[in-house]
Amino acid sequence: MTTIHTRPLGAPETAATAAAIHRNALGAAQKRLWQAAIGTMAPDAQAKVPQGPEMEKLDLDALLELSGQATQPRPMAAMLHSPEFRDTDLRSLETRQPEAVGAATLDRTRLGTNARHAPALERAAERTGIPATALAAIVNAEAAKDSSGQWNVYSRNSRSSAAGLGQFLSGTWQGMAETRGTWLNQTAQAKGWLDRSGQVRPAARAALLQLRYDATASIETTADYAQANLKLLKRSGIATGEDPSAVARTAYLAHHLGPGDAARYLKTGLTDARASLLLRAQIGGGRAAQAIARSGDASAAHRAWLDNYVGSRVRPERFA
């Protein structure tokens, strides 16, 4: 007769298993809530989402840059006053007022081999108000990782200029350096990399871009970029959420689509032409055509794919 050994519910192994099940269930529920908040997905939409290697890396900016469709990123200071966002009030980034996005304590043990980045994540969170768990989730989705899951600070997309833990394109990184009040702007000023007008000196551009490979610089700038994008979305009348999951996923969405496209995506949806361009850039022309045919239009196909990716990959609860 086989003897079955049981352990009380409070035993470490059982408790850990129960905690893991709870986290997975919570993550699934938060994913559904987030998808509902940004737009109803058809019941069979997830089944129509393209699968395979193309799902492994979300890098819309990089792929659009490769195809020649990317636009030159504008400095965040200019975007704050763009016509599409000027209809509501927005505080300057220079006020550095933390966003009321809810509290989430970072569990350093949950970072695993990335625990050494905990101090930088916590400092950036305290400075900007973006939860440390949300920042960890964004970096975890952006950076390349080795077999142990360790983030590669030297991550580089060979198809574009995207680099570092935050995978910032050269133009976006320079724009953040030229945006008053950001961590990168203050650092560039201290190093004498900016001229009198606040623009990056040509001779200093290489050194500035090299700073993308500094973990602290990348994490701090990821936080500033997330904060700025969330403010822009709020100014356009979009509720970005207050819990870390909603904050992380909305910020991640804006990181790739840009605040303009993100606002349209969340409010009315992208046009079929724009959605088709983005979907083809991400998964290839052939698969995009198949997905569009199954969904009926490009906007629905792109939304199904992107909602599923962001909801599945950007999960702050894994670090709490």
Image: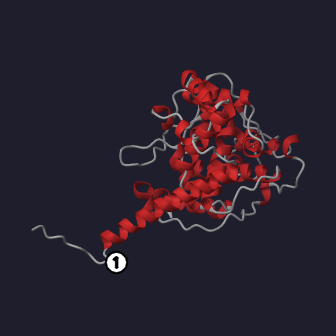
Q: Residues within 10 Å of mark 1 (few under 14, many from 20)?
A: few
Q: Is residue 316 above or below residue 80?
A: below
Q: Residue furthest right?
A: 87
Question: Image point 77% across, 52% down: which residue?
Answer: 238
- Residue drawn at point x = 59 percent, y = 45 percent: 43
Picture layout, residue 264 above or below residue 217:
above
Identified by mark 1, the residue type is Gly
Q: Quadrant of residue 234?
A: bottom right
Q: Quadrant of the N terminus?
A: bottom left
Task: Read off the residue under disc 1.
Answer: 10
Is 59 rendered above or below residue 140? Answer: above
Colour scheme in the image? secondary structure
> 302 or 214, which is in the foreground?
302
Determine if residue 319 is in view: no
Residue 271 visible in the current orientation: yes
In percent of width and height, residue 121 lies at 56, 58
Specify whether 112 is left or right of 67.
Answer: left
Q: Please report the residue visible at 63 percent of the width from the left and 22 percent of the height from the top.
A: 67
